[in-house]
Image (spheres, helix red, strand yellow):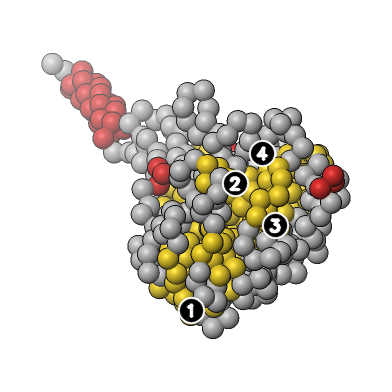
Amino acid sequence: MTSSKLSGFRASGIIAVLVLSLFLGACDGGSNNTGVNHKPLATIAADVHARIGQAAGLDAGASSDADGDALSFRWVLASKPADSSAGFTATTAAQPDFTPDVEGDYLFSVTVSDGRLSDTANVTLHASRDIALLDYRVLDAEYSRTLDRLVMVAGSPNRLYMRDPVSGDEAAIDLPRMPTSVSVSPDGLSAAVAYDAWVSLINLEQGILEHTWPVSTDSVDVVLGGNGYAYVFPLTNQWTDIYSIDLTTGAASGGSGWSIFAGTKARLHPDGQRIYGANNGLLPSDLEAYDISAGPAGYLYDSPYHGDYAVCGNLWFSEEGLRIFTRCGNVFRASEIRAQDMLYNGRLDQLVAIQALDHSAAAGKVLVIPAAQYTPDGEMSPEDTELQLYGDDYLAFESRKALPPFLVGGKAYAGHGRFVFHDANGEHHYVILQADDTSGLLKDYGITGY
C-alpha cells in the first residue's frame, strides 16, 4: 500500500471514530436522551378546606418533569369572594401558604415550567368559619337572653352547661341522671331539666342545682313557667296528661286525665299564661293550647283546623308572641281570644320541614335550619346543612348560607344544624352543629357564630 493511500485510510477512520464517539456521547451524556424536551406535569393536591384567618397550605410539590429538569412555579389567585381583600404573595414556592379572610371559594392556578415548556393546574380553597368543638354531645338546648348564654344538657357525663358563645367560657352543673330536655324560664335566670321520672330546678345565675323532685312519668319535653311551676310532657302511654310540679313544694298534679297524646312537644307562650303543644303520633297533626294562669296546666282547645295545615309535631314562637311557627313551615296567629287563636298566617316557603327556628324582634329576622328528609333511596337529604333567613314582616325569604363543615385530617365533613339562637340584641346568632356520621368523630358537636 502506498503512503498516500494509507494516509487517506487513516483520515477516514479517524472521522468515523469521531462521528461514532459523538453519537455515543449524545446517548449517554445529557438529561435528554433524544434531544426532545418533554412538557412538565403540574400536579396539585385535591381541593383544600380551611378556616377563615388560618393559614392553609397549597401543594404542587408532586409536579414532575420526565427529563429531570429543574422546575419553577408561578401561582395566581384567579378568583376570590367579592368581599375578600386577602392578598397572595408567596407565588413562586412549590408549597405556598394562603390565609383566607372571608367565607367562600378561592380559585388558584399554578404554572409549572422547566424553562422551555410549562403546564398549568387549578385548585379551589374552600374557606369556612370556625367551629368551636364541644367535649359533649348536646341532647337539648335553649338560650338565656338575660345572661346571653347557651344553656345545654348532655349525657356522659350528665351535666347542664352554660356557655358564653363569644368567649367560649363555660360553667358545668352536674345532674343526677341522663337528661331528656331543658327549659329556660321567661326571666332567663332559671332552668328546668327533665329526666325519666324526675325533674330538677337549676339556678342559672348562681350556677347551682336547687332541687330535684320525682314525677311519675317519663318525659319528652319540659316547660318552665314564670309562675313557680314546671310542666312535664310524657313520652309514652298514648292518651295521657300534663304533669304540673310545684317548684316550692315538689308536689305534682295531673297524670290522671286524658288531655294530651304522649309525645307532644310544648313551649311557653311569651305572655306566661299559656302553653301551646304540637302533638305527635296523631293524624292529622294539630296544635293545642293549655291554660297555666292558676298554676296547674289545664287543657283549653285545639286549632280550628283538621288537617288543613300540617303541624308536624313541633313549634316555636315569635319573640313577642304573635306568631306560632310549626315544623312543617306553616305559621299561625297566637291570641288570647279563642276565635283569633291558631288561625293560619302564612308559611315559610323555602323548606319542607324545620329542624330549628329562632326569631329576634330587634333584628326583624327569623332564622331557620331546615330539617333533613329521607330520599327515595333511603338516604338523608342535606337540607340541614344550611341556614335560611326570613323577614318577620311578611315572612319573605331573604337568603341562605351553607353551615361550615367539620374538618378532620384535612377532609371536610358536613355540619348538620341542630339548634339556632339569636343573642340578646339580635346582632349575632349561633348554631349548634353535629358532624356527619361519616366523620367518625366521637365528640361530634360544635358551635359556630355569625
Q: CA distance from mark 3 to mark 1?
A: 26 Å
Q: Are marks 2 and 4 in contact (CB under 8 Å)?
A: no
Element type at mark 1:
strand
Mark seen at residue 286: 4
What residue is rendered at 39% in x and 61% in y? 178
- Comparing marks 2 and 4, which lies closer to the viewer? 2
Looking at this view, is 433 or 439 the one in front? 433
Q: Which residue is mark 1?
A: 210
Decide: few, some or many residues near mark 4? Use Cα within 10 Å; few <14, some 14-19, many ≥20. Answer: many
Q: Position of residue 193 (x, y in %)?
A: 50, 65
Q: Is the residue marked by circle 3 packed among few (<14), some (14-19), or many (20+) residues within 10 Å? A: some
Q: Secondary structure at mark 2?
A: loop
Cα distance in 3D space between marks 4 and 3: 17 Å
Q: Nearer the viewer, mark 3 or mark 1?
A: 3
**Secondary structure type for disc 4:** loop
What is the C-alpha distance between the residues marked 4 and 1?
36 Å
Residue labelled with disc 3? 291
Q: Which residue is mark 2?
A: 259
Looking at the image, how many numbered discs can be counted on the residues?
4
User: Where does the image place residue 155, in percent across and percent down from the top left?
Assistant: 39, 61
Badge 1 density bin: few <14, some 14–19, many ≥20, Cα 10 Å: few
Alpha carbons under labels 2 and 3: distance apart: 12 Å
The amino acid pointed to by label 3 is Asp
Residue 72 showing in the rendered view: no
Q: Residue 437 in the image: x percent, y percent?
A: 41, 44
Examine the rendering and report whether any part of residue 390 can be seen.
yes
